Image: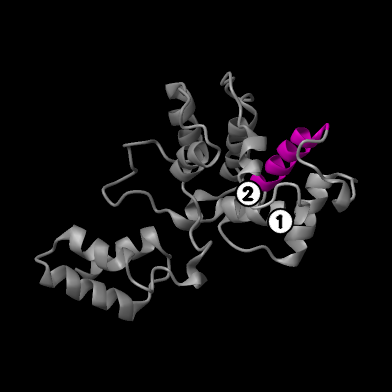
Amino acid sequence: SKFICTKLYQWFLYEQVDDSFVDGMADVFRNSNYNIKTVMEYFLTSEHFYDPVFRGAIIKNPLNIVQGGIRQFGLHGNVFPDDFLIGWQWFMGMMPLDPPDVSGWPGYRSWLNSITFPIRKIASINLLDGDGWEDLGFMTDVKTIAQSTTDPNDAEILVEDLALLMFGTPLIDTLKSNLLTALLDGMSIGEWNINAVGAEDRLRNLFRYMVRLPEYQLI
């Protein structure tokens, strides 16, 4: 029971397990007659699972990059070619429904190497722009995403909200400054207006910059 609970913990939360918490999970698992649903409810509703220390603790797998990106960018109403969905994941090291062995994919740091890291960036930009390796015939509506934030006409609030959407963690000052630079591209903060000429191009450049960052590889 502890072996299975350890695997659940590593897949859904963090590679390095908290032994005392996993021992509690194993007890729940055994006492429920090895009911996966029961132990998952215990795990996913625990305070431990929602501890802020685990934000950004998991490296996204290829499914998170592709299908997760589709949902994140509001593209789930579109039809994607099969070779797009399967091909990108294969290039990143995960052939859907075809794990390397019965234990599944190793995960965690194994997802990132000198080949897959650039591919992950290219796939995300393909979703943003609608072209690249695969011409999708549609692109992410970055303006609509930006308009869903707290105050899209305040550049500082905008990058903070978009960072929370894209990275899942609050911004540190250095990264916030870099995001503002990417968005404004020489414009002053006070000049920013989401309906201004060229604003959508600036937003798209910001999204391209964000998906290239290491922070985007984490959940």
Q: Is residue 34 above or below residue 86?
A: below
Q: Is residue 204 left or right of residue 131?
A: right
Look at the image and tell me in which quarter the N terminus lies.
bottom left
**x and y percentages locating residue 144 in the rendered image:** 62, 36
In the image, what residue occupies the spot 89% across and 46% down?
A: 187
Q: Is residue 141 above or below residue 105?
A: above
- Amino acid at pointer 1: Ile
* Mark sitting on residue 35: none
Q: Is residue 34 left or right of residue 98?
A: left
Q: Is residue 74 magenta?
A: no
Would you say the residues marked 2 and 1 are in contact, meaning their CB atoms lie under 8 Å apart?
Answer: yes
Q: Is residue 142 above or below residue 37?
A: above
User: Quick one: SS at disc 2?
Assistant: loop
**x and y percentages locating residue 118 in the rendered image:** 63, 41
Q: Is residue 20 left or right of residue 85?
A: left
How would you classify the magenta stretch by its main secondary structure? helix
Task: Identify the image quadrant of residue 200.
Answer: top right
Q: Which numbered disc flags the more N-terminal residue, 2 or 1?
A: 2
**x and y percentages locating residue 150 in the rendered image:** 64, 52
Q: Residues within 10 Å of mark 2 (few under 14, many from 20)?
A: some
In the image, what residue occupies the spot 59% across and 50% down?
A: 166
User: Quick one: SS at disc 1?
Assistant: helix
* Mark sitting on residue 149: 2
In the image, what residue occupies the spot 18% across and 72% down?
A: 28
Is residue 190 visible in the rendered image? The answer is: yes
Q: Can you identify the residue that label 1 sits on?
A: 157
- Amino acid at pointer 2: Thr
- Identify the magenta region: 197-212
